[in-house]
Amino acid sequence: MVINEHLDDREARDPQRRELDLMGHLPGLLVNALKSPGWRQHLGDIDTTKINSRSALAQLPVLRKSELPALQKARPPFGGFVSGELERFGRVFTSPGPICELEGKHNDAWRASRSLHAAGFVSGDMVLNTFSYHLVPGGFILDGGARALGCLVIPAGPGNTEQQLDVIEQLRPVAYTGTSDFLKILLDAGEAAGRDMSSIKKAVVSGAAFPPSLQAHIKARGVDAYQAYAIADVGVIAYESRAREGQIVNEDVLIEIVRPGTATPVVDGEVGEVVVTSFDPDRPWIRLAIGDLSAILPGVSPCGRTNTRIKGWMGRADQTTKVKGMFVRPEQVAEVARRHGELKRLRLVVSRVGETDAMTLRAESDSHDPSLQIAVAETLRSITKLGGAVELLALGSLPNDGKVIEDARTVG
């Protein structure tokens, strides 16, 4: 049953038609990206005409967002990943890292309008936008999407709670954009002060976890809040609809879920790291690994939108930790798996034995041959330069949560 109108016909396209469209545009996207020295260096000598399927795309290297600060510092200001003149861009931002981001001049440059429309925002709505407009793009991401829908935006930014309560009472905005935490602060402060916050009926929240307890708290205050999954580099990647069954991937965005520490896609349903390819002609991103965990959900949304759905944010993929003063990384666990094809899902558990750090590699395998256990332990030592125990487990024994390294050491 269709429970929400769509922004346009693209949202309800046949999934195969959408996939053919995306794959058809991949070669051109790569040609455009390769005009810049950063992408040429990163991608190497590739035949763009042959990159026209997900399997072909998966052969390209990922670019980890965590690498961008060093790359941009080495080749300022954008790491060589922007070609041509900057006049086609309207704004430049710097986010923590620091990472520099550019905003195109075209309408709704960050693709936020679909997430707002799915949450019930319509032309004529007045929106209190509490994302920051200072150096970071968060405020402009939602501002641009709201204005593209015909909404009137109050550029409030974060903080200044008392002043914002005054603005709400005077201007009576019907919608809110910002973090869920700040929405709670406003609603709680308004109630405590006897202020009228009742005009706000709907919200799109992002930038922080939105646990069920907080969802219930805000719903009880009369606000229907939906999540948007966005990052400063790409804009809105996925969003909730009124079906509230996962988050729908935005149009002109392609998502892969890869095993943490690798560039290899996992099967649908398995938790892994989110990798984004963004079909933006001015600012393309090719397999940007953003460091978040999620998983692909089966089927399409009951709201009628047919794009891929993900579970939403499920934690961080970068699980690097220190053991006996040495860094141990997900890439090293992946290398153990690569050298031993008999192993399936792996998890390195770091604990304390007495007053000493200890590692145990727990690995699913059809084989429980002691010689395999010994060989894996030797490989683990060779790769990490640290000794560790190895446990071979039955298939399906480890939880599907995307964790490759689990730090089980107690703090304090």
Image (cartoon, rainbow, N blue to C red):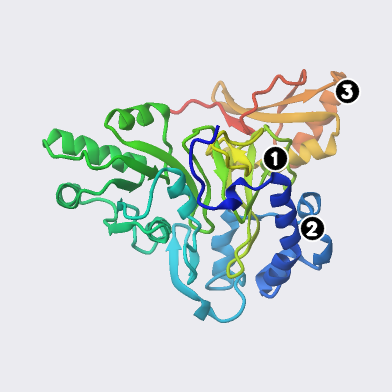
* Mark 2 or mark 3, whichever is nearer to me: 2
Amino acid of disc 3: Ser
Tell me if residue 60 comes above or below residue 3 in the rendering: below
In this view, the residue farthest toward the left is 194
Toward the viewer: 163 or 28? Answer: 28
In the rendering, which numbered label is found on residue 259? 1
For the C terminus, the image quarter is: top left
Q: Earlier in the sequence, mark 1 or mark 2?
A: 2
Q: What's under tag 2, amino acid-wise? A: Asn
Q: Which mark is residue 52?
A: 2
Q: Secondary structure at mark 2?
A: loop
Q: Is residue 41 something that shows in the picture?
A: no
Above or below: residue 139 compared with residue 344: below
**C-alpha distance separating marks 1 and 3:** 26 Å
Mark 2 touches mark 3? (CB < 8 Å):
no
CA separation, marks 2 and 3?
43 Å
Is residue 42 shown left or right of residue 325? right
Q: Is residue 311 left or right of residue 105?
A: right
Disc 3 target residue = 371
- Residue 31, percent from left and from top: 73, 70
The residue lying at 72 percent from left, 62 percent from top is: 25
Please tell me whether mark 3 sits on a helix, a strand or a loop. helix
Q: Amino acid at mark 1?
A: Arg
